[in-house]
Image (tube, helix red, strand yellow):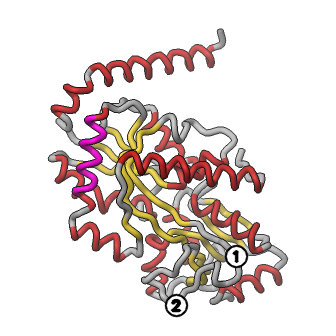
Amino acid sequence: MTKFRLDAVIEAAARAVLVCFALAAGPALAQEFPSKPLRIIVPWPPSGNVDITARTIAPALGDALGQQVIVENRTGAGGTIGTAAVAKSAPDGYTLALGSSGTITNAPAVYKTIPYDPIRDFTPIGPIQSVPIVLTTAPKTPAATYKEFVDLVRARNGQVSIASAGNGSSNHLAIELLMRQANLKLIHIPYKGSGPAITDLLGSQVDSMMDQLTASIGHIREGRIKALAVTSKARSPLLPTVPTLAELGVTGFEASTWTGIFGPANMPPAVVERLHSALKKAMSVEAVRERYRSMGVELMDMSQPEFAAYVRADFEKWRALAKEGNIVIE
């Protein structure tokens, strides 16, 4: 047996032991849970949509659980490194992921290989919010409307760059969908998160960007970047004068991103219920709700089984799109 195969067998056996222990100790764990601080792993750098979402909910979630909730950024590989770390963690409820459509349903749909299965390896705890993606241009890019952007792309014969938070992210798939449905040729520049991408957009190192409205709204309001269109079904109340791509002739275009709390697979049901109840309580805090509303998000409210079904359906949607469009990331 090769060393690689032996390592895989050892890892599988170790995970099986952890699962058996968690199931056997489930009632006891649930009764005393939580007895120590929890971690929420954010698989992206600070200041992006997922990071902002985590740092908004963490204090209220900690209050609801009676323990500190620590946000830890663990970045790399389009968000898959931090997400995989949660999948491989002990299923005791103390290590959670701030999961998003980018890491849970988008990346697994397009990556040829990925270190986790989005359905088999996670326990969906509950949703937080969904948010439109916005198409923006840099200060020095000579396009302030979608029509001007299209004209610029065609005039430059596809030599217009567009940034995303990383390969396989929600932003990346929105770009691929736009290029396909609008018949545009763009140069995709993947970054290690929205924060670094926005920094280069502000400095006009890239021409344009697809990003969550939560991360871009402040720069748009200050006039530092230009909002051309949103990707949701309806216009955002925060940008009422910015049309949707569907309004602009990209028929049927819709690509929003969502976030939620996830744990590893095989968590004790009572611990899952405790976390779900605490999340709902945290989401009911008016200061939390107002903070999210100020960022232009739509708050989500589902039971734990409803959220699990929603995640599965979203994964199947993007997997079908990737297969149809032959979108594969090595």
Q: Which residue is mark 2?
A: 241
Q: Earlier in the sequence, mark 1 or mark 2?
A: 2
- Mark 1 near mark 2, Cβ–Cβ under 8 Å? no
Q: Residue at x 49, y 35 (%)?
A: 121
The residue drawn where x is 59% and y is 80% is 244
Specify start and end residues of the magenta stretch as a single range.
270-281
Residue 271 shown in magenta: yes
Name the residue beneath numbered marker 1.
251
Counting from the top left corner in percent of width and height, residue 168 is at 62, 53
Dominant SS of magenta comes to helix
Above or below, 99 against 189 in this view is above
The reply to whether residue 52 is in sight is no
Work out whether residue 249 can be spotted: yes
The type of residue carrying mark 1 is Thr
> Of helix, strand and loop, which one carries label 2?
loop
Above or below: residue 206 compared with residue 301: below
Under tag 1, what secondary structure? Answer: loop
**Residue type of the residue flagged with mark 2:** Thr
294 inside magenta stretch: no
Q: Quadrant of residue 151?
A: bottom right
Residue drawn at x 51%, y 34% is 120
Left/right placement of residue 264 relative to residue 160 reads left
In front of the other: label 1 or label 2? 1
**10 Å crowding of disc 2: few (<14), some (14-19), many (20+):** few
User: Between marks 1 and 2, how big is the CA–CA gap?
Assistant: 19 Å
Provide residue 79's location: percent of width, then percent of height.
52, 49
Percent coordinates x, y for residue 162 in the rendering? 67, 70
Say which quadrant the C terminus sits in.
top right
Whether residue 161 sits left or right of residue 94 in the image: it is: right
Quadrant housing residue 245: bottom right
